[in-house]
Amino acid sequence: MLMIPGPTPVPEQALLALAKAPIGHRSGDFSKIMADVTAKLKWLHQTTNDVLILTTSGTGAIEAGIINFLSKGDRVLIGDNGKFGERWVEVAQAYGLNVEVIKAEWGKPLNPEDFRVKLEADTNKEIKAVVITHSETSTGVLNDLATINKYVKAHEKALIIVDAVTSLGAMNVPIDELGLDVVGSGSQKGYMIPPGLGFVAVSPKAWEAYKTADLPKYYLDLGKARKDAAKNSTPFTTSVNMVIALQASLEIMQREGLENIFARHLRHRDATRAAVKALNLGLLAPDDAASASITSVLPPEGLEAEKIRATIKKKFDIVMAGGQDHLNGKIFRIGHLGFVSDRDILTAISALEASIAALGYTNFTYGAGVKAVIEVLNG
Ligand SMILES: *Cc1c(COP(=O)(O)O)cnc(C)c1O
């Protein structure tokens, strides 16, 4: 049982699609599927912009989102308050962009004021893009995309490029309403299918920038992808079965409805956080900046994060995620993203209680975590 922020659990309808014999990626049958999947992706992204399918992991989608709309030496502001923000700094530097990093401590949200000050001071309009990780998966912090985006919009020139890998399909990311230029995501997160596909939504303003952007690109050239997408195709052989699995998962999502999907993720976040508090464990992300897809837990003195994880795995075959880099051994992360039900949250919290009890932790009343979950789930 995967309770990690990707790969996430996959429903049977999608698994069955993966078991089928592949069909030709240039066949008429496959074009029909591409047309349907693209329409459904636009629904999920709440946009009329292009939504392109890449055969990459999430990183490929964000790398494409950065390199297609910028030129060598362009000044970009990148938010870094975790592993993924740090990665986009590395990508931008690898391509020779002039990167200004806006940092916040891991576990804290980015401060929108830091962006406002830089953007307002840039009267020569040298800043070409602002890159933000919406839900920072390494910490479970949700950055204030709407406020940062407001300052980018006031600047007028800069594009906003968003890593929405653990927010898209879990939290509200209204692309058209906010006017987000480039939004990247990956299949193994909110999409409820395995790793292997990346998605990039691109605004008309970003396509304008594409025309003069000179960073090197080939496989990740979104212009190529756009041209072929207009014919319901892809420039290179896509993962045919994954696209068919995606059609199945998008059908499930449409049946549930966006409002219900977002409400479910918020409910699971609130239930998990309430349980963690009731067990007298700590939470890394503050209540007002907590991602709905992942919760980072700080064990108290004397209880080791890695031992808790190992015990939950061994006793209950439930996988939770560890901390990355300097947070390794300091936190463990409970993923509640994608194909996750109320039953899964009850199960995970019960297993957590049983495991910390088995490790000799006594600073809680048996059932306190489960009680907290029930209270949130019952509203
Ligand atoms: C998972 C993830 C990615 C993409 O990682 P890949 O391993 O390349 O799929 C990017 N950003 C965030 C915030 C993520 O959680």
Image (tube, rainbow, N blue to C red):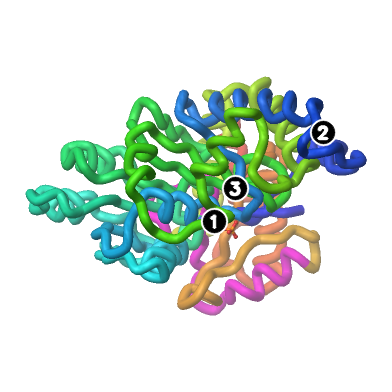
Is 139 placed left or right of 315 in the picture? Answer: left
Instruction: Find residue 109 and report its image quarter.
Output: bottom left
Residue pointed to by mark 3:
198
Q: Magenta segment, which residues?
A: 285-313
Determine the secondary structure under disc 1: loop
Front position in the image: 86 or 139: 86
Q: Provide residue 296's location: percent of width, then percent of height.
A: 51, 59
> What is the distance, in whole Å, between disc 1 and disc 3 at their CAs?
16 Å
Residue pointed to by mark 1:
218
Asked if ligand 1 lies within 8 A of label 3, the reply is yes
Q: Residues within 10 Å of mark 1 (few under 14, many from 20)?
A: few
Q: Residue at x 71, y 71 (%)?
A: 310
Q: Amino acid at mark 3?
A: Gly
> What is the distance, in whole Å, between disc 3 and disc 2 at their CAs?
20 Å
Q: Provide residue 356's location: percent of width, then percent of height.
A: 65, 66
201 is higher (above) or lower (below) than 143: above
Determine the secondary structure under disc 3: strand
Nearer the camera: disc 3 or disc 2: 3
Residue pointed to by mark 2:
13
Q: Amino acid at mark 1?
A: Tyr
Residue 306 sits inside the magenta stretch: yes
315 is higher (above) or lower (below) than 40: below
Q: Residues within 10 Å of mark 3 (few under 14, many from 20)?
A: many
Is 237 placed left or right of 91 in the picture? Answer: right
> What is the distance, in whole Å, between disc 2 and disc 1 at their CAs?
34 Å
Q: Which sits earlier in the primary sequence, circle 3 or circle 2? A: 2
Q: Provide residue 93's location: percent of width, then percent of height.
A: 37, 69
* One can see residue 9 in this view: no
Is 258 placed left or right of 214 in the picture? Answer: right
Front position in the image: 323 or 167: 167
